[in-house]
Image (cartoon, rainbow, N blue to C red):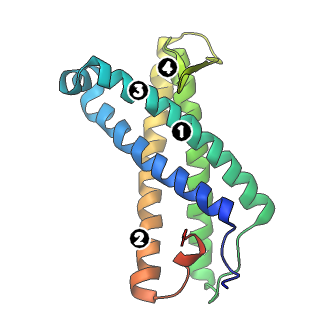
Amino acid sequence: MQTNRYGFLRRILHWVVALSTLGLLAVGMLFFFFDVEGTQKLFGADTTNLLLKYHKSFGIVVLIGAVLMFFMRRNSGVPVYDPPLTLLLRWPSKLVHWLTILALIAIPILGWLGTAASGHAVQFFDWTLPGIIGKNEALAKILFQYHLLVAWVLMGLVGVHLLGAFVHGKIAHDNINSRMSLI
């Protein structure tokens, strides 16, 4: 039995957050390139409204998951690397993981605040969450710009993370990837 793995709950949480994030980034890019009106022309108003609703809903799922990941990583640390990583690999790994978690917390908060400031409902599936702040179109624009900026940063971090996973799995052939594997 491998003892340098994350616990099952952390592995499930990682994959729920990872897959949700990939879907959120894809839908977010759809809105970035086509905006809401363009997306409505492509897919119709009903589908666009569903995309917006589920983008917000899964954003809250990711926020909750990322907060849990933050506290789990802070309180429990990470399993030992076997074989150990060199300092040259360990520091960038830690940095990418912490920045990713912080981005996964920041993006939904910025989206939540931006949605509230734009005067729209903050939806979590079939519930409406409190808006936290009042309507302010100028502030909404700024918040959504930061929402987008941090999302681009997150895409870069995800790319680095995936590159690291590729290198460990296909080049180094070590067992680092098995630490987060569900099987």
Name the residue nearer the viewer: 137 or 34.
34
The secondary element bearing badge 2 is classed as helix
Q: Nearer the viewer, mark 3 or mark 4?
A: 3
Mark yes or no: residue 126 visible. Answer: yes
The residue positioned 61% from the left and 43% from the top of the image is 105
Q: Above or below — where is 31 with respect to 14?
A: above
Check disc 1 and give the amino acid type.
Answer: Ile
Quarter of the image where the C terminus is located: bottom right
173 relative to 44 in the view: left or right: right
Residue 163 position, x and y percent, is 41, 70
Crowding around mark 4 (Cα neighbors within 10 Å: few <14, some 14 to 19, many 20+) is many
Along the polypeptide, which appears first: circle 4 or circle 1? 1
Q: Quadrant of the N terminus?
A: bottom right
Q: Residue at x 61, y 84 (%)?
A: 85
Categorize mark 1 by other alpha carbons within 10 Å: few (<14), some (14-19), many (20+): many
Mark 4 vs mark 2: in front: 2
Q: Say which of marks 4 and 1 sits in front.
A: 1
* Dot 2 alpha-carbon crowd within 10 angstroms: few under 14, some 14 to 19, many 20 or more: few
Q: Which residue is mark 3?
A: 52
Give the residue pinned by disc 4.
140
**What type is the residue that disc 3 sits on?**
Leu
The residue identified by callout 1 is 107
Determine which quarter of the picture holds residue 12: bottom right
- x, y percentage for residue 77? 75, 67
Precedes in sequence: disc 3 or disc 1:
3
Mark 4–mark 1 CB contact (< 8 Å): no
Q: Which mark is residue 21?
A: none
Q: Position of residue 54 (x, y in %)?
A: 45, 31
